[in-house]
Image: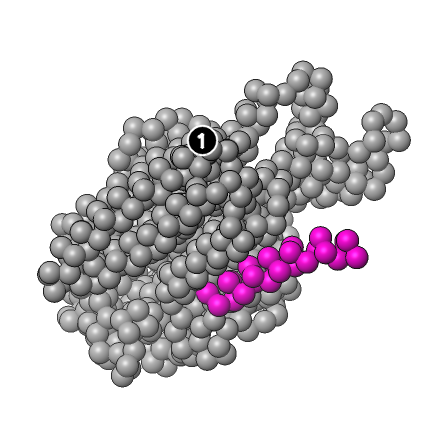
Amino acid sequence: MSGVRRAGPGALAALALLAMVLVTFADALRPSRALFERDILGYWYPHRVALRAALASGQLPLWNPWLGFGAPFLADASSELLYPPTWLALALPFPLQFEILAIGHCLLAAAGAALVARRLVGGVLPAAAAGGAYALAGPLLSALGLYHHFAGAALMPWVLWALESLLQDASARRAILLGTLAAGQVLAGSGDLVLMTALAASARLALHVGGARARGMGALVPRLALAAVLAASLSAVQWLPTVERGASGLRGAQDYRTVTYWSLHPVSLVDLGVPRLVSEATLSGEERLRLFEGREPLFSCLYLGVVTLALGAIALVLRERLALPLAAGASLFVLLGLGRHTPIYGLLLALPGASLMRYPQKYLLPASLCVALLAGVGVGALARGWTEPERRRSRALGWALLGVVLLVTAFAWRQAGDASGAVAALKLGRTALVLSIASLVLLLRGAAAAPRPGLVPAFLLLGAIDLVLVGRGTNDTAPASLYEHQPAALDRFVGASGRLHAAAESAACLAPGAGPAGWPRSWVAALGFVDTLRPPTGIRFGLFGSYDGEFTGLGPRFAAAFAGVVHAGLGRPEALRLLQLGSVEHVAYLGQSAPVGLEPIATLATPLACPLLLLRVPDPLARAYVVGRERDEGSNALAAVLDSGFDPRREVLLPGAAAQADAAAAPGTARIVSRTPNTLTVATQLQAPGVLVVTEAFDEGWSADVDGRPAAVLRANGLFRAVRLGPGEHQVRFRYRPWPVLAGALASTVGAVAAVALAVFRPRSGPPD
């Protein structure tokens, strides 16, 4: 019976956390509604469609032929291709897939934070408080639309819990557990969260080393090494292709402005204690540029909870163990979140791999975890007996909070006098109310050595209600029909063999217009995104992209200038030339007038501010063709392509090509025979030596054989793939087999076998595990 009694509070706490999460996501649980914001509908969904298409072809999804001119699939870690939950949910309908992943990871975050708090503080209430405070923290819930960061943040406390377990007992099995969980976080796809977790783990190890005996460290070091090797090997199949691509692609060359984009402005720190006061304020264009880079904030909600912050303050005032390190960790991560607004971020960029990351505001995720754990420490302090000095400090804190209440109330009163500030006044008044209750709790608690019955649970209930009410408004849902919506433009592309380019005349055209009756602006904007086939939406419908722009920073550096010319303005001769060169057959143009040089097909109404003009590109090159002359591209491939003396129908630009005499315009023909995600087969017939060009992205991972014999794949016209051919009929087969994937798969296989062997066949000698 004693075991049952011990399990009772834990089970109740688990049910409470479950209820909090389910209530927060109640709207998403309705079959008619679906989560859709930020990257969910626009990026996650198209890539899941591409994943299903790749698997249906019987191949592993190594290359995504629909994104731009093609792009590595596995190297894009945000696709989460090797993350186990992706495969578990793959058979479900798409909206349901994401909802299960969202709720499941939120519960995972709650459980992980609770386990860490249980290790550090002990007790059910502190663990439950930390779990709830982290799972429903504004930054974590706001990260849902950045789904791979959300998954990485959910796994962060689990990695730290495994580390804490290893520090308490340096056994082989706990080292294997730490390595496996760390590998799982890598597979979740967020390099940022891996780096943040590593920083937090390093700080925890530093604290441990500072208080550890030399004898204890002798057993710990090899176990930590084992965990690190296992984590690196198990996840090598993901990180090796991603790091190779990131280092050689645009990520490796991004400037300081790009790295620090979406730095948290110091003014936004107010939102940590007042939900969405700054992020939802009515701002001028200049103010929005200063606070949010001229866009919406990266995290729509930064609220950590008044009760959560008050509990953290209690832990600090009572000088609880680990309170100061946790507060220091939270402060450090908040400072890093300020990005370019503080010099400390420049020091972070000196760390290996840190310069590949971007958007410093994401550092609020580990800051939220530190604050949640600090709140757990505060709950432990509230529930124990207090000395007279501690009671005095509690009362002093209570009176200080009342002073803050008066200031907040006065500011709210001032805002209420202005019609535009009524909403801000309500938010401030709400915070003042919760803060006044917190101050009353502190005054009551400081009046006695032992806590009053029910005081701590009631205070935690207030905090839970507060977080749930704010959390319910963080992730909007829309009609699930958005996932099945078919744009009217698709009917015009039936039978098209070329590529599509989608563009907008201006940012103003992307603004929501007259959508379905009763739809809010966010729904209308999402519908318009699909209707106008904004990249990478076309993947959903099997359309091949072109100069789509750079989403992940993993694109090759040599391609950026080409896309820049096209995006700088359609209607210019150089943009039209690149469209033709890239086999772009149609342009979906959101604007009022067609760019010069493109042939109008139709004008379609959209739910956005401008109509959609469907345009035809005159005389584009075929997606596979043969030319008879080579020319050296020189030091600037783009300039060579745009040179009026270059005729792409007669010649091709190749690196280091030798000069040739004039050749026939078309020494042969080419026809695409078959296409799968990782292969392309082209049948050719040549009367004279020539070069086959396919307008698909060049990548070092592509190999080719001509009639079964290996042939070199060359970069053609700055962007594409080419193979030299002799006279006669040939069958050219391209295959994508990048070495980082093969090496990573081998390393991960070895790591998995080693982990199983170590877990099952432990050494019999030495100290017990």
**How many neighbours does mark 1 have within 10 angstroms: few (below 14), some (14-19), or many (20 or more)?**
few
Residue 701 spot, x, y in % from top left: 54, 45
> Would you name the residue on which mark 1 appears?
389
Which image quarter: residue 715? Answer: top left
Looking at the rendered structure, the secondary structure element under dot 1 is helix
Q: Nearer the viewer, residue 7 or 497?
A: 7
Residue 551 spot, x, y in % from top left: 38, 52
- Give, as a three-letter code, the residue at label 1: Pro
Q: Nearer the viewer, residue 541 or 397?
A: 397
Identify the image quadrant of the C terminus. top right
In the picture provided, is 350 more to the left or to the right than 258? right
Which residue corresponds to the image point at 77% horizontal and 53% vertical from the top-left?
A: 2
Q: Can residue 678 be seen in this view?
A: no
Which residue corresponds to the image point at 19% horizontal and 72% vertical from the top-left?
A: 610
Q: Looking at the image, which residue sits at the far right?
A: 764
Q: Nearer the viewer, residue 372 or 30?
A: 372
Identify the image quadrant of the N terminus. bottom right
Residue numbers of the magenta segment: 1-24
- Count of marks, rendered view: 1
Which residue corresponds to the image point at 55% horizontal and 73% vertical from the top-left?
A: 93
Which residue corresponds to the image point at 38% horizontal and 40% vertical from the top-left?
A: 395
- Check the image and report above or below for 281 versus 30: above
Residue 663 is inside the magenta segment: no
Residue 326 spot, x, y in % from top left: 47, 35
Q: Is the magenta stretch mostly helix, strand or loop?
A: helix
Residue 2 is inside the magenta segment: yes
Q: Can residue 450 be seen in this view?
A: yes
Which image quarter: residue 676? Answer: bottom right
